[in-house]
Amino acid sequence: MLDGENHRRRRQLVMPSFHGDRMKAYGDLIVNLTKKVMDATALNKPFLARSAMQEISMQVILQSVFGLYDGTRCEQVKDLTGKMLDIFKSPFSSSFLFFPFLQKDLGKASPWGKFLCQRQQIDQLLYAEIAERRENPDPNRIDILSLLMSARDEQGQGLTDKELRDELMTLLLAGHETTATAMAWGLYWSHYIPKASEKIRNEINTLGDKNDPVNILKLPYLTAFCNETLRLYPVAMLTFPRVAQEQVEILGYQIKPNTVIVGCMYLVHHREDLYPQSKQFKPERFLERQFSPYEFMPFGGGVRRCIGEALAMFEMKLVIATILSNYQLSLVDSQPEVPRRRGVTLAPANGVKMVMTGKRTRQESRVMVSSQ
Ligand code: HEM
């Protein structure tokens, strides 16, 4: 999944920087998709917040990254990706991705054989989409695939089909499950601590009719709430591994060249000196003081930090704001959700079982969709 510095540089160049028209377009897209998924949720019937959030984050990726809105190809990519991502569900079934000796193609029934078959089918769909775009370039498209296709390096070279396909897969795999899990935790905390959702709604109401995505993004309590959600159970607990290039001392430990080091966000986020009563959910701590990138690091750190951070935070805030201001939800279980390893993420063990009891129609609570 990880490739060379060259790719990373180009990928960074094209990741949307979220300002102006592009930000508005992505914001409206996220709000509308959230409403579409939530409107389809049956009243008074339990549903899993994690599944609803997966549906939203998958649609956001398909539209914002791949530029796939609807149609057969879109449905096929969604279906196949869902199946492929199931492999990442448990640390056990995902282990063969990390251990080459388990990667034996013993036919479609074997885990690796199944993975290869699904990957090949997605590849075909992606290559077909890339070929169509090359034939009919449309300068008005704002999806990341279009941006990647127009990106050029210093020598004026664009990406090959294979490179484009690799970029799309990386963004899909790195961005879908992580963001969905973060949003599921956000829904959990906002309903487990009703005061928190009340505060978010009140804050949104202070915007009046200026409740567009750009202003929602800047709300201080909502920002603190999302940060606290990512602090307490960081969706990605660990950074990608780093290899020491030379002898270095870290916190008094001598690290020899070639030593593999993995950072653990969970441990940093539970340092009592930084976050007193660290197991408690308290968004206010992010309003009371600023934390440095060495103290709060849900997206990793340094040159390999997550490149999807801006998109993920934008999506998380807009989805939570849209849901809290438009729908009445409650948790089905009174027992607290506990974190459990789900593939490479730290997810709510029971998927956050919720029920929708109604829609908010009062003028002051009815917020969002800024496309006018
Ligand atoms: C809440 C959601 C997300 C979380 C918590 C998260 C977290 C992380 C973390 C911890 C890393 C490793 C950083 C390191 O080793 O220092 C990472 C890498 C990465 N993330 Fe995210 N991520 C999220 C969403 C996204 C999204 C939406 C995208 C893209 C659409 C994305 C794309 C990537 C990519 C491409 C890398 C690899 C960067 C590289 O190779 O240098 N992530 N992410």
Image: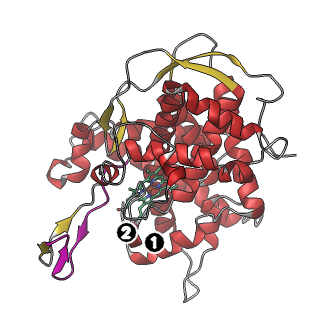
Q: Name the residue under label 1.
A: 8
Q: For ligand 1, which image quadrant applies?
A: bottom left
Residue 364, horizontal then vertical, whole percent = 80, 30
Residue 100 falls in which quadrant of the image? bottom left
Image quadrant containing the N terminus: bottom left
**Where residue 65 sits: x, y (%)?**
59, 55
Other residues around mark 2 within 10 Å, as few (<14) / some (14–19) / many (≥20):
few
Kindly give the residue lying farthest to the top in the view shown. 44
Three-letter amino acid code of the residue under disc 2: Asp
Residue 331 drawn above or below residue 294: above
Q: CB under 8 Å between callouts 1 and 2? A: yes
Residues shaded magenta:
236-252
Residue position marked by numbered label 2 in the rendering: 3
Q: In this view, does 118 lie above or below 306?
A: above
Front tag of 1 and 2: 1
Residue at 53 percent of width and 39 percent of height: 78
